[in-house]
Image (cartoon, grey):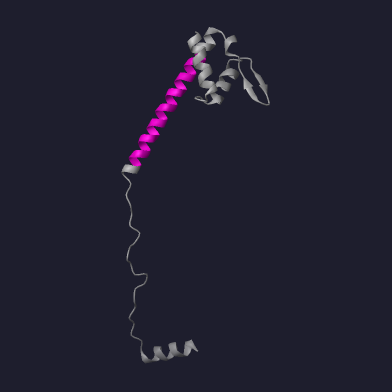
Amino acid sequence: MNDKIYYIKENIINHNINHKIVYDFMIKYNIEYIKNMNGIFLTINILNDNHINQLYDLIKHNINNYEFISNEMEDYSNNIEDNKIIIDKKINKETYKPINIEFTNIEKIILEESRS
């Protein structure tokens, strides 16, 4: 049991587990704790064996999930990096298309008059 208590303490102290998970556990099982301006404090040594086992399993499970998700995200990120397609932005397209219109003499006169 001492090994489990040590494991719990180490992972809480070293922030290997989200403290909200531990806090939710304490609330769920109505475990006494001390709360002040410095944070929330839990005396693990006063927990019964059942709570120690449950907390140990909870921490172990969540750390394994965190490691699994971290590894998956790293693999995914590496996979994206390996498969990245670089798009060449130097596309030579004309921004306009020239229009060749033949105006009649009357249309030319109207256009000339409209400019002035």
Report if residue 69 lies within the magenta region.
yes
Number of numbered tags placed on the structure image: 0
Which of 47 and 14 lies nearest the eye of the viewer? 14
Report if residue 65 lies within the magenta region.
yes
Q: Position of residue 85 (x, y in %)?
A: 32, 49
Q: Is residue 113 above or below residue 22?
A: below
Q: Position of residue 29 (x, y in %)?
A: 58, 15
Q: Residue furthest right?
A: 36
Q: Is residue 109 above or below residue 88?
A: below
Q: Residue at x 57, y 13 (%)?
A: 44
Which of 23 and 34 lies nearest the eye of the viewer? 34
Q: Position of residue 115 (x, y in %)?
A: 48, 87
Q: Position of residue 67 (x, y in %)?
A: 42, 27
Q: Residue at x 40, y 88 (%)?
A: 107
Q: Is residue 99 above or below residue 31?
A: below
- Magenta residues, as a range? 54-80
Which of 28 and 60 lies nearest the eye of the viewer? 60
Which SS type dominates the magenta stretch? helix
Q: Residue at x 44, y 27 (%)?
A: 66
